[in-house]
Image (cartoon, helix red, strand yellow):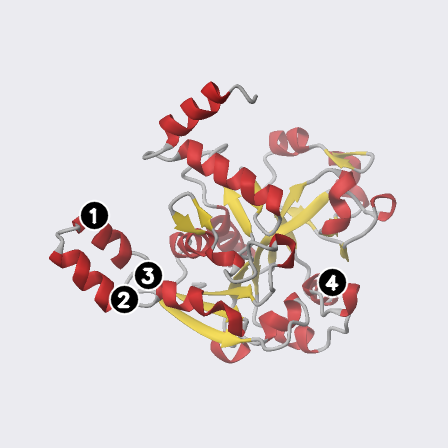
């Protein structure tokens, strides 16, 4: 069983300035919970029991969020605020361990992941990027993307990477997979993935022939972009140690996966639902509105407000 996950959150959130000047990006609220709470909840629902947060020194607020607050809980008990007390106590379930590792200098995603090696080596594990919020409102809510990836890993022994079609105009912001000619001939129209045809085929996974970090549109092998969820074997550590600096002079995880794929072929899993890039201001705003509209507490009032505003 895969019971461990790494959440690398050492990046400084510069795309979200000035919001993130004094507040970690991961602590920005999505309606009534900080973003990182949704990410940890996703891991827990997938069966993860041990979570390693790789953090920059400026992100102590995240550590405090998952720690117990005896003073606050005592005050809520005195005021008989039972619902709020239960919400606070459920932030970190008692059977979940959350550990912290400092990255120090930010040198890219692969470097951040490598810092967690002492806590997870010897076992396969999941990697969850905290700026990607998976929205399953548009699909069967009983389907959990991360759990499906873990199940596929257990079934095949092959590393799993989540992908999503994105417009070619945005492809240079992503790591991109190359599926190889046979798959492209079946499911691509030029450079565009035919999602409908693939879903009708009922295939469960997509082969990965190569991976490319942030290609320009005219050089991209397609429009299937990596969206921040991975399940990998313990063999990844050797490749992390031998990944040279790449795009932006940082140690890119896509480059690590490309090296590993030569020896240990991996598969892509097509996302169910869609995702929000909460590391960008527009993506964050879209996520907030979507989750507000779906909220049991605020959804009706939010929808009415938008309808009456006359702005759309």
First in sequence: mark 2 or mark 1?
2
Q: Residue at x 27, y 56 (%)?
A: 88
| Disc 4 target residue | 258
Separation of marks 3 and 4 at Cα, in angstroms? 35 Å
Alpha carbon distance from label 3 to label 2: 12 Å
Residue under pointer 2: 69
**Of pointers 1 and 3, the one earlier in the residue sequence:** 1
Q: Which one is in front, 253 or 102? A: 102
Residue 145 x %, y %: 50, 46
Which of the two discs, 3 and 2, labels the residue nearer the N terminus?
A: 2
Q: Residue at x 43, y 31 (%)?
A: 293
Q: Which numbered mark, 3 or 2, is in the foreground of this view?
A: 2
* C-alpha separation, residue under disc 2 versus residue under disc 1: 16 Å
Q: Are marks 4 and 1 in contact (CB under 8 Å)?
A: no
Neighbour class for label 3 at 10 Å: few (<14), some, many (≥20)?
some
Kindly tell me whether residue 136 is visible in this rendering.
no
Q: Position of residue 279 (x, y in %)?
A: 60, 52
From the image, state whether disc 1 or disc 3 is nearer to you: 1
Secondary element at image label 2:
loop
């Amino acid at each position: 069983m895969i019971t461990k996950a790494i959440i690398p959150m050492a990046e400084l959130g510069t795309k979200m300035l000035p919001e993130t000047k004094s507040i970690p990006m991961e602590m920005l609220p999505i309606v009534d919970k900080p973003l990182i709470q949704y990410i940890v909840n996703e891991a827990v629902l997938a069966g993860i029991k041990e979570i390693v947060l790789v953090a920059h020194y400026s992100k102590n607020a995240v550590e405090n969020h998952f720690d117990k607050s005896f003073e606050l809980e005592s005050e809520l008990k005195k005021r008989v605020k039972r619902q709020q007390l239960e919400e606070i106590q459920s932030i970190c379930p008692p059977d979940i361990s959350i550990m912290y590792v400092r990255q120090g200098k930010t040198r890219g995603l692969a470097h951040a992941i490598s810092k967690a090696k002492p806590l997870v080596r010897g076992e396969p594990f999941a990697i969850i990027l905290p700026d990607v919020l998976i929205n399953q409102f548009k699909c069967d809510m009983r389907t959990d993307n991360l759990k499906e990836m873990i199940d596929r890993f257990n079934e095949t022994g092959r590393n799993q990477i989540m992908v999503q079609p994105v417009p070619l105009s945005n492809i240079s912001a992503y790591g991109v997979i190359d599926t190889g000619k046979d798959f492209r001939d079946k499911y691509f129209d030029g450079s565009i993935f035919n999602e409908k045809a693939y879903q009708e085929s009922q295939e469960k996974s997509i082969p990965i022939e190569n991976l490319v970090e942030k290609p320009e549109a005219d050089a991209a092998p397609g429009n299937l972009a990596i969206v921040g969820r991975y399940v990998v074997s313990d063999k990844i550590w050797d490749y992390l140690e031998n990944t040279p600096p790449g795009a932006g002079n940082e140690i890119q995880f896509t480059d690590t996966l490309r090296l590993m794929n030569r020896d240990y072929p991996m598969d892509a899993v097509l996302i169910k639902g869609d995702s929000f890039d909460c590391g960008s201001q527009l993506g964050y705003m879209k996520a907030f509105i979507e989750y507000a509209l779906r909220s049991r507490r605020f959804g009706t009032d939010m929808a009415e407000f938008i309808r009456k505003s006359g702005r759309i």
